[in-house]
Image: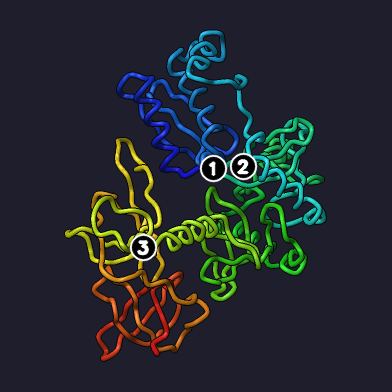
Amino acid sequence: MDLTAARTLAENLIAEHLPSGWTFAFDSATTRLGQCNETRKRITMSQQFAAAEEQPAIEQILFHELGHAIAGAKAKHGPAWAAAARRLGYTGKATVRHEDTAEGADLIERTLAAAEQVKDRTSGPLIMGEKVHFLGGKQGLFVEARRTRAVIWSPTRRRLMTVKLNQLARIGQVAPARQTASTPSAAASPEPSTRPAASAASRRQALIDHALSQVEAMKTRTEGPFMAGETLTVSTGQEFIFIEPKRVNALAWSVAEKTVYRVPMASLARKGQQSSAAQQREDRLARAIKAAPAAARRTTGTIIVGEHVAPAPGYKPFTGLLVDVEEEKRRGSGRTAVISRDITGDLIRIRYTDIVRAPGAYIPSTASPAEAVGSGDHVVVINPRSKHNGATGIIERPAGQSWRIILDNNSGVLLASKSLVRKNA
């Protein structure tokens, strides 16, 4: 679910059922879905869960936590809590397990799939799929590290668990915490103890190396969750090697630029396929273009999908095709206009009451700039909302998702998004 819509849903429920002073926030939890903090008067929800699930599942977690707020902390999961939660519409058990959600199931599936590939690994930072043990003799599969803790999949308990990183070790090795307690010389050693994941930098490099080593093995993979080593594309045609997911984003290795980026998961797709975000965008745009001929004849009345529009005075000027009208994604009433901007095809959202009809017809976006331009090319910047619209120059080098352009007539240097740069004829 869209995070803005999830936040709006939560805030509306809090305003309706709880006294003033209660607030809502997302958190980075990976093994619980929601929490009610009565002291701070705050309800939180896992951002990963909210981004991966649909509205009915999110509502159930909110009903669960609102029940705690209404019944009080002392009620725990007793009859008073159950009665309060069910009055709101809660239908589940006392505790909803993260592994039973779509996001949790996806995490487990990728961990199990990676286990076979890393079974012979004996050194370096722990990576997804490795067999580990921790204090108490428990065993599991390493999923991911979260600051000083790790997420573990326990096959025997069939659930995700969190364990301190310094209590983990590969099967056949000794966890640092236990080794310190059992080895007399360890206490006297002047050297500081280390944990398997020595640093964030070394762990990231290990993940990159592992992903790059799996590229050939992953070439035939065409379905299922993305796994380390898969070659994926984005709408601009750029290629990335998938490393690991990070909430709603992914760590990915840029094939062209040989560096790591955070890329929205929804924008990634396998070669020959299309991302869900790109498909939804194309579907909406196709419906608007189909409606454009009839809509173009309108000169009065309500502005409808398919009309050529511009923002009201006070905004930076641009023109584009109205592709959708959405309910405003924040508390309160109102609607938002979704506009596909002329030439660039960028989607822009402004208040529906702030758009006006524009002369002329919609100008579709051109071919992908990633295919058309590169270092050394003479280009023009297409950005109707910027003072640099129409500026020309020579591409010096890439800079992340932008081009560094030396402007003509030695008038300076400009960083321009790759989606807004076209080769100059």
The residue wearing badge 1 is 48
In-image side of 97 versus 388 (left or right): right
> Which residue type carries mark 1?
Gln
> Which residue type carries mark 3?
Leu
How far apart marks 2 and 3 lie (CA) works out to 35 Å
Task: Where is residue 372? Give x, y as percent.
Answer: 49, 82
The residue wearing badge 2 is 103
How far apart marks 3 and 1 lie (CA) works out to 33 Å
Secondary structure under tag 1 reads: helix
| Mark sitting earlier along the chain (2/3) | 2
How far apart marks 1 and 2 lie (CA) works out to 7 Å
Q: For mark 3, does the 10 Å Cα neighbourhood hold few (<14), some (14 to 19), or many (20 or more) residues? A: many
Task: Where is residue 279? Give x, y as percent.
Answer: 55, 58
Are circles 2 and 3 on residues that touch, CB within 8 Å? no
For the point 54% across and 21% down, the residue is: 90
**Picture quadrant of residue 421:** bottom left
Task: Where is residue 201? Give x, y as percent.
Answer: 56, 59
Note whether 40 is above or below 300 in the view shown.
above
The residue closer to the viewer here, 410 or 421, is 421
Secondary structure under tag 2 reads: helix
Are circles 1 and 2 on residues that touch, CB within 8 Å? yes
Note whether 330 is above or below 267 in the view shown.
above
